[in-house]
Image (tube, rainbow, N blue to C red):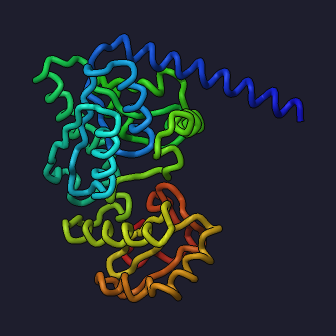
Amino acid sequence: MRRTRGNAVTDDAGRIERYRRLLADLGGLQSAVLAFSGGLDSSFLLHAASRAMGEGLTAVTLDTPYAPRAEIAEAAALAGRLGVRHVVLPVPFPEALRDNPPERCYLCKKALFAKLLELAAGEGIAHVLDGTNQDDLGDHRPGLRALAELGIVSPLLSAGIGKADIRALSRQAGLPIWDKPSGACLLTRLPHGRRVTAEELKRIDTAETWLRSLGFPAVRLRSHGDLARLEVPRDQAPAVLEADARHDIDAKLKALGYRHVTLDLAGYRMGSLNEKPDAASVPPPCGDA
C-alpha cells in the first residue's frame, strides 16, 4: 500500500510540474488563436491558456457541417464561463471530403487550420494552438502531419501532458468536462468512400444526441446505408437493451430512416470503421473494407 501511495504522490508531483511548464510555455506566447472544439483536450487547454494569456487569447470554434451541434453549444458555454473571447467561424463543407476519403483527417486539418492561420494573421497574432496531447502519438492520427506542415503549436504535447493529466487537472480546476468522453467529428460514423450528405450527418447527430440523453455519453452510431450499428462500452450493452424496452430505440431510429438497428457486441472502439476484416469476415452492408 505504501508503494501505491508513493507512486500516487510521485504522479501528482510530475503532473503539477508538467502543468507549470504548460503555463510557462503559454505565457511566453503572449497571444494566440486556439482551435476550440469543445472537447476535453481543447477545453482544458482553453482553461490553461486563459490563465496564462488573459486577453491575449482568442478561442475559435470551426462550425463545419460535420461538427456535432451539442459540441458547438458546449464550447460557447465554457468560453463564456471562462471569460474568453470566442469566435464561431462557419465553414462550408470542403469538397475534398465529400466522399469521405481515407486521408480525411489530413485533408480536414489542412483546410481548417489554414483558415485559423488566415484569421490569426489578419489580427496580427503569430500563433495558432491545438489540443494534441501525449497520448495522441500512440494512435493513428494522419491529421498530425497536417498540423506539423502548417506550424501549428501543440502546447499539451510540448509539456508532456497526456489524457490522464488532462482529466485529473480539469477535475481539480472544477471544469465540468473532466469526465467527458472523447469525441470525434461525424464523418467518423461513415465508411470511407461513402458519399456524404447534409441529411445523413443530421440524421446521425440527431440520433446520437437522443441516445446520449438516455444515459449513453460514449455512444457511436456507425451508419451503413439503411443500417445503424450502435457502439457503446461493452459493460453498457445490457443497459441499451433495457433502454430499448423503455424508450423503443429501434422504432426511434427507424423513424429517422434506418431499416435495421444493431448493437455491436464488440463494443465501442475508437476508429472502428478503419478496422480491416479478415478473409472470413462478412462484409458490412455498404461494402466498406
**113 with respect to 153 (left or right):** left
Residue 244 vs residue 133, the one in the foreground:
244
Dividing the image into 4 quarters, which one contains the C terminus? bottom left
Determine the residue located farthest toward the top in the rendered image.
28
**79 with respect to 267 (left or right):** left
Q: Where in the figure is residue 46, as x and y percent of width and height?
A: 37, 32
Q: Against 110, is 14 above or below?
A: above
Dividing the image into 4 quarters, which one contains the N terminus? top right
Q: Against 140, is 158 above or below?
A: above
Residue 75 vs residue 63, the one in the foreground:
75
**10 with respect to 139 (left or right):** right
**Residue at 54 percent of width and 28 percent of height:** 161
Determine the residue located farthest toward the right in the rendered image.
1
Residue 181 vs residue 97, the one in the foreground:
181
Q: Where in the figure is residue 211, as x and y percent of width and height?
A: 43, 71
**19 with respect to 90 (left or right):** right
**Residue at 50 percent of width and 60 percent of height:** 218
- Residue 147, by quadrant, is top left
Q: How many marks?
A: 0
**Residue at 31 percent of width and 38 percent of height:** 79
From where the camera sits, is residue 270 visible?
A: yes
Q: Against 268, is 106 above or below?
A: above
Q: Against 93, is 142 above or below?
A: above
**Residue at 65 percent of width and 22 percent of height:** 14
Q: Where in the figure is residue 132, as x and y percent of width and height?
A: 43, 34
Determine the residue located farthest toward the left in the rendered image.
122
From where the camera sits, is residue 95 visible?
A: no
- Residue 70, by quadrant, is bottom left
